[in-house]
């Protein structure tokens, strides 16, 4: 059965459904021309994978842009080589390039908008585990033993690498904290919660980014509490160039205060 990929959000389904549940949710949207689909094979005919340095780590994304236009990051940590986030397209060339760097030991994804073709990637990389938060289990479109769910607020992969349930955007929204890499001082890999702003000096907090629905204050307070113990100098956002390099902890703290003051006004 042909596996379909939504052209708006990039999520892969086990067949071609009548609608995309991800896009019909209030956090996402159906395109102006209605629901449209492609396949992995068709995507290979029109797109390639762009692999280049992204502020000190290897970034991987589709060229030309596709769907949400996220990019994945390859993180060589003491917890293993981690592919942070996922993509709709897998290519033999990209897999070979990653294997040449030492391979991938696990995939970790921040939230359902970025699940993409995660099983295609897992299988291509040798059936590596995919770590997702249990709270977002119902958003998995292609169940598999390769998908492993974790629970609670914190999942420590090593002394230096931790997954934190930041919540807010989705109940299971997750950030990755790498306390001593890729640069001295560490980094926060944030996905969409918090979301690096276009000025690359702030982050923001939204229930829906495309539909301009702000995140409730209680969720933002909870996120601030859960990130309070993390030291980092850099923040890596969801797409190319959307990073805060240097002063990341101060930028996040100032953004929490700014946002909560604005919604209380």
Image (spheres, rainbow, N blue to C red):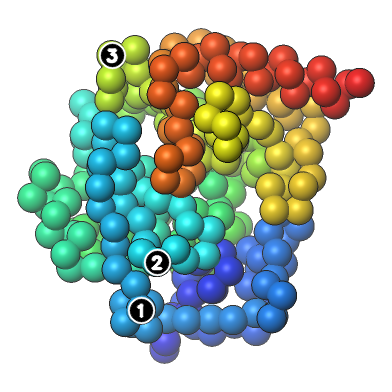
> What separation in Å lies between label 3 and label 2 (alpha carbons)?
33 Å
Q: Which mark is residue 242?
A: none
Quadrant location of residue 94?
A: bottom left
Direction from residue 214 to residue 125 in the image, left or right: left
Closer to the camera: disc 1 or disc 3?
Answer: 1
Direction from residue 173 to residue 15 in the image, left or right: left
- Can you identify the residue that label 3 sits on? 184
In the depicted view, which residue is nearer to us: 130 or 214? 214
Q: Residues within 10 Å of mark 1 (few under 14, many from 20)?
A: few
Q: How far across and how far down the image is residue 160, in percent?
A: 31, 19
- For the N terminus, which image quadrant? bottom left
Q: In the image, is residue 58 above or below residue 223?
A: below
Q: For the image shown, how many numbered marks are present on the structure?
A: 3
Q: Secondary structure at mark 1?
A: helix
N-terminal of the pair, mark 1 or mark 2, is 1
Q: How far across and how far down the image is residue 46, in percent?
A: 35, 78
Q: Secondary structure at mark 3?
A: loop
Residue positioned most to the front:
199
Direction from residue 116 to residue 211 in the image, left or right: right
Find out whether the residues at labels 1 and 2 contact each other: C-beta distance under 8 Å: no
- Can you identify the residue that label 1 sits on? 46
Q: Secondary structure at mark 2?
A: loop
Residue positioned most to the right:
265
Q: How far across and how far down the image is residue 235, in percent?
A: 45, 27
On the question of residue 148 being in view, the answer is no
Direction from residue 174 to residue 160 in the image, left or right: left
> Which residue is at 28% across, 14% downward?
184
């Amino acid at each position: 059965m042909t596996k379909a990929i939504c052209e708006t959000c990039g999520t892969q389904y086990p067949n071609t459904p009548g609608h995309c549940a991800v896009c019909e949710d209030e956090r996402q949207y159906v395109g102006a021309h209605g629901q449209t689909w492609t396949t992995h094979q068709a995507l290979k005919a029109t797109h390639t994978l762009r692999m280049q340095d992204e502020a000190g780590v290897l970034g991987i994304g589709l060229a030309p842009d596709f769907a949400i236009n996220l990019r994945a990051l390859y993180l060589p940590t003491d917890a293993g080589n981690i592919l942070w986030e996922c993509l709709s397209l897998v290519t033999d060339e990209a897999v070979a390039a990653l294997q040449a760097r030492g391979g991938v030991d696990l995939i970790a994804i921040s939230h359902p908008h970025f699940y993409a073709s995660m099983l295609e990637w897992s299988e291509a990389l040798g059936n590596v585990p995919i770590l997702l938060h249990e709270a977002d289990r119902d958003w998995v479109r292609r169940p598999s033993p390769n998908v492993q769910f974790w629970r609670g607020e914190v999942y420590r992969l090593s002394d230096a690498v931790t997954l934190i349930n930041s919540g807010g955007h989705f109940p299971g929204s997750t950030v990755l904290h790498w306390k001593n890499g890729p640069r001295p001082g560490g980094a926060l890999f944030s996905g969409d919660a918090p979301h690096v702003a276009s000025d690359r000096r702030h982050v923001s907090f939204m229930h829906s980014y495309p539909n301009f629905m702000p995140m409730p204050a209680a969720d933002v307070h909870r996120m601030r509490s859960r990130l309070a113990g993390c030291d980092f100098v850099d923040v890596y956002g969801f797409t190319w160039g959307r990073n805060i390099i240097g002063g990341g902890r101060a930028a996040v703290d100032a953004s929490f205060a700014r946002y909560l003051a604005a919604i209380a006004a």
